[in-house]
Image: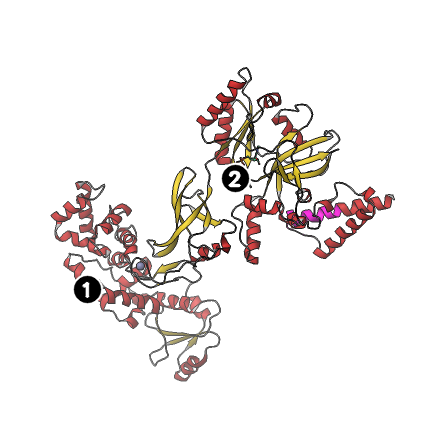
Amino acid sequence: MTDLRHRMKALADQVRLHRHRYYVLDQPLISDAEYDALERELRDLEAAHPGLADPNSPTLRVGAPPVEAFEKRRHALPMLSLDNAYSEAELRDWEAKWRRLAPEAEPRYAAELKVDGLSLSLIYRDRRLVEAITRGDGETGELVTENARTIADVPLVLPAEAPDRLEVRGEVFLSRKRWEELNRQRDVKGEPRFANPRNAASGTLKLLDSREVAARALSFLPWQTLWHEGPGEDQVRAMARLGTWGFGVMPAHGEGDLEAVLAFIARQAEARLRLPFDTDGVVLKLLDPGLQQRLGATDRVPRWAIAFKFPATQVTTTVLGITWQVGRSGKLTPVAELEAVEVAGSTVRRATLHNADELARLGLRVGHRVFIEKGGEVIPKVVALVPGEETRDLPTPVIPEVCPECSGEVGKTEDGEVAIRCLNPECPAKLAARLQHFGGRAALDIEGMGEALAEQLVASGRIEQPWEVFGLLQEPLRALAFLSGLERMAEKSAQNLLEALEAARTKPLSRWIHALGIPMVGARTAELLAEAYPSLEALWAADENRLQAVEEVGPKVAAALRAFVAVHPELPGRLAGWGVHPEPPAPRDLAALPLSGEVVVVTGTLPSLSREEAETLLKRLGAKVTGSISPRTSILLAGEKAGSKLAKAEALGIPVRDEAWLRAFEG
Ligand code: AMP
Ligand code: ZN
């Protein structure tokens, strides 16, 4: 007999250990099959020897076979709701109200976090968990005992000092981390996401198969004890005692008069956001249990407690439309047009959907009811569909094929980027951003050309291209009148701006090239181009192949530059007409570079450098890089699988070098 008892105890310990490794630490030590064998042996022994079964056995935590439906149970005392307050004034009103009923009583409170989950009543008889009942309609709930047993923070057995009859009420919830994990699993399985941890906890507690509940790892925090005999301890002491009996304790609580509670609320407004689970308020409870009993309850809420609610950050509303906004970089962002709704103290009519992928992931359609959330960021976002909405027959939203601003082509630019962009570099939606770049520090550095001015210039409709601001210099008096008429532009700053423009006319050519916003031409490339071409006119006249002889200019950059020139052939002339004469850089002694005069062809796969990197390096060393072997080729840089070019070079007697040779120049 004792052997059997030992064996069962050892099995129970092992099952507990492995469940912890698996569900909590996510570091299993044994295979699922080995675990199942241990658990099965324990279950079989428990079934064969019910007298020996430990009421705290871990088999009770892993869930029992599914049930058809939950039984209904009446609550001994109704599970009420809580009155709400949304401001300090409402709390003071509530205090004044109960004090009229008990003028002599001392106003001392317990303040607890309001956990955003579902309430659950746990019934203990002779210190054993016998029933767990959901709130239901407050009078009658559902019997979910098997599910509750799987919750690690629900003690199945209480110590000897606990009373024979005890009811503990508290909140069942899911941590944000578990909720996110759960949603990831559901994404994989193609199942709809849970909008928030609360929904996930609620769905979980009502699963008919408690083994599934066990895997979801719910949590429980108590917020009330019902002793069913005598008034019991005050709220703070009662919760502390539950802690010593194996229940969890709230991560923060307060105690004192209303001023102390208000200070607690102020601290929690921020602190609660760092907790691993959601909270939506602070519950104030009169500390004295005798006073609680005297005040009693209305048919809906107790008079001795009230919930101070933090402004809601998540609400539901209906999607009235989906529009696409073109950002300053040309990025197209889908925006949900919403039925107006209050969130965290402001009215929300629009929410971002981030990008087309997100739209698809949400499965969002016009007409859907959705959860929206206003977090730390200013723009609210759509979190998920309200459950059940996904089955409605609504048309799939259309992803735009052309830019809503300019009807230009739309597509993805960088590899792997999910956003779609307007590919038209001249899109008016991009003009303000281009103008800011034009006058920005790295470009022409025009004092006073900030975001506000850029936006007003665009709105005025006076310019279609950034450089057209220099046209203002043609008629300085009219320009002054125009600029002074803009918002936050005194005549003095208008004057300063015109002077800054005048001075910018002879800024270095490299800054000018960079300022124009030619696709793929950054500051460094602009410098190299300015060294190779002494003026904008010369650059405009450069031929595409010759351009590629410039260091860091490959076929893509050369093509982008030529395309830009083709769209703006008149640009250098117009600028000259406005008195713009960029200053060319002092000539650099190109002949001093180690590979100047060499004409190099690159072929095959190099051990570590990509083709582009090798070409950049060669150009920086002064070499000219060309695409095919000719009698003028002086060096062939060859890697593996070098094919016909290698044969041709050898036939022509051209020296063949490898990457190591090139790298040696780097010192
Ligand atoms: P409400 O559902 O908004 O009326 O709020 C009442 C519910 O808040 C209760 O039924 C409990 O489920 C829940 N609750 C969460 N935390 C607490 C707490 N510390 N004290 C009392 N109720 C709480
Ligand atoms: Zn566009």
Give the overall secondary structure of the magenta segment.
Answer: helix
200 lies above or below 188 = above
The image's colour scheme reads secondary structure
Q: Magenta region: which residues? A: 13-28
Answer whether labels 2 and 1 touch (C-beta < 8 Å).
no
Q: Nearer the viewer, mark 2 or mark 1?
A: 2
Whether 19 is among the magenta residues is: yes
Residue at mark 2 = 274
**Whole-percent x and y of residue 237?**
63, 26
| Vertical position of residue 140 compared to residue 31: above or below | above
Q: Name the residue under label 1.
A: 570
- Along the viewing direction, whichever of 36 and 612 lies nearer the viewer: 36
> How many labels sit on residues?
2
Earlier in the chain: of badge 2 and badge 1, it is: 2
What is the spatial separation of the Cα atoms under label 2 and label 1, in whole angstroms? Answer: 58 Å
Tell me the tag on residue 208: none
Quadrant of the image containing the C terminus: bottom left
Visible in this render: residue 275?
yes
In the image, taking residue 18 as reference, residue 180 lies left or right, namely left
Residue 321 lies within the magenta run: no
* Mark 1, secondary structure of its residue: loop
In the picture as drawn, the residue positioned furthest to the bottom comes out as 651
From this viewpoint, which residue is outermost toward the top?
104
Q: Which of 75 and 163 is in front in this view?
A: 75
Question: Residue drawn 74% across and 29% down?
Answer: 161
Of 167 and 311, nearer the camera is 167
User: In this view of the protein, which residue sits in the foreground, 8 or 147?
Assistant: 147
